[in-house]
Image: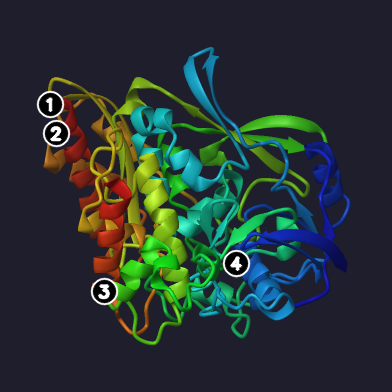
Amino acid sequence: MRELEYLRPGDAAAAVAAVAENPNAVFLAGGTNLVDHLKLGVTAPELLVDVRGLPHDDIVEHDGPEGPVLCVGAAVRNSDLAGHPLLRSRAPAVARALLSGASPQIRHQATTGGNLLQRTRCVYFQDVTTPCNKREPGAGCSAHEGYGRYNAVLGASDHCVAVHPSDLAVALAAVDAIVVVLGVEGERRIPLVDLHRLPGDRPDLDTTLSRGDLVTSVEIPLTPLARRSTYLKARDRASYAFALVSVAGALELDGDTVRDVRIAWGGIAHKPWRATRAEDALRGGALTPERVREAAEVELADARTTDQNAWKVPMVRNATAQVLAALAGDVTG
Amino acid sequence: MDTRIRLTIDGAEREVSVDTRSTLLDTLRERLGVTSPKKGCDHGQCGSCTVLLDGRRHLTCLALAVSYDGSEIVTASGLAGDGAEEDDEQLHPVQRAFLAHDAYQCGYCTPGQVCSAVGMLEELKEGDPSHVTEDLEGPPEATDEELRERMSGNLCRCGAYAGILAAVREAAGEASA
């Protein structure tokens, strides 16, 4: 591991300035992903700017213009957020997504902001002996021809087929969360669905953030829709594993008719995949297993698969049907 | 770059100068002679380096020591009272349950398992939900399914899980009694 300087900034503005002015500086939060990358040699910064101690560790309910909003500080631990009574009752998909991630120890350490900015677990990205465009632009992509079971099926490019690993981000995409970011030019608010990007020809860039941008909080609208939400994660073992595919859903029914619906997918793409085409196909019609499967097929029309990851398509389609059926059961039962 | 940090470890104040790259685990084991937390995978996948950090179970392999200046750490050996080597009564109830149920074979993961179980029982008492908790709003119960899920961050290469579950189940019963 390369020698490292360490800075504990006095406030968020100092943290932003320190990273903005040094191309070899990175933020350190919970460290569960970054410290591993330092050991593996995936990244080799010169300076760690430790934001763990900044006062972004509150969870507060606010009255927003469109209703109540839960404001979650970026330094709030995953376990503290998952256990918060308001989140559990008013946005259960987010609580369930958090509880399905990592292990209890890691959830005590990992932060809200860090969770969103964690990097792919693509085996080639983490193995510095193999070419990877995300780790080293222009090196080539080993996953295209190599072990491809986890590869993306939507939105991938010739340069990168990695998927985003966060469960939290998928649930936040489904409940229309907003990410608050402090940059050198001040504060701005980004819809969660616009925080991450597709790989295109720049897979080294996971997000739309600029150098020095610091996530300071996440806003979760506590809507009636979010109250009827849940998260389903399919994985290789019952616990402590990343998603093969995952589905966050929210549903509002009027009798048998879908008044409103949200669907977001994990394990499918380089970013949390909000399935807006499937939502549009379902809105205003009856909720039947056939219509849910048809709606999922609309969203998956552009899927590109190999024989190693073709199973993801029926798995995410069926998981979506299972999530909406469970939510409909909650509503009617 | 070296930074001087202060830690409270099993009740004793310790001061040490650490390189930014040093993990909490290496600092405890190699610099301070605190060998109760074990290095298993060193990548946050096995849980054998688990301690109680500021009261909660926490890995030490994915934590840089410099970032934990001022923290209070309790290791498995610090859970026991003085004289525990001669007198089992001085052991923590979770440690006694591990002995009673033969909840180990080689013992390497045991200090992490014990710290994790102590933290887990506290989380149950606080009403924290888990992945398998059906009703997110109600108090969770210490069912076997809950205990297994809540201990899933600690691997045992010997496969002593049946004994570990029995020990944790007994400790959970004592904790709620």
Mark 1 → mark 3, Cα distance in angstroms: 46 Å
Residue positioned 26% across, 61% down in the render: B170
Which numbered disc covers residue B101?
3
Q: Quick one: A210 or A106, which is closer to the camera? A: A106
Please tell me whether mark 3 sits on a helix, a strand or a loop. loop
Q: Is residue A299 visible?
A: yes
How many angstroms separate mark 3 from mark 2 (CA)? 42 Å
Mark 3 vs mark 4, CA separation in Å: 27 Å
Which of pointers 3 and 4 lies earlier in the amino acid sequence? 4
Say which of marks 1 and 3 sits in front. Answer: 3
Query: Circle 2 sits on which residue?
Result: A329
Three-letter amino acid code at disc 1? Thr
- Out of B2 and A261, give the one closest to the viewer: B2
**Distance from label 2 to label 1 (Cα)?**
5 Å
Q: Are marks 1 and 3 on the same chain?
A: no
- Residue picked out by circle 4: B60
Between marks 3 and 2 in the image, the one whose residue lies nearer the viewer: 3
Residue at mark 2 to residue at mark 4: CA–CA distance: 43 Å
Q: Position of residue B12 (x, y in %)?
A: 69, 62
Task: Locate residue B140, reporting x and y percent.
Answer: 28, 43
The subunit letter for the residue under badge 3 reads B
Task: Residue under label 1, please give it.
Answer: A332
The answer to the question of whether label 2 and label 1 lie on touching residues, with beta carbons closer than 8 A, is yes
Which image quarter holds the N terminus of chain B? bottom right
Asked if the residue at tag 2 contacts the one at tag 3, i.e. Cβ–Cβ closer than 8 Å, the answer is: no
Kind of residue indicated by mark 3: His
Cβ–Cβ under 8 Å for marks 2 and 4: no
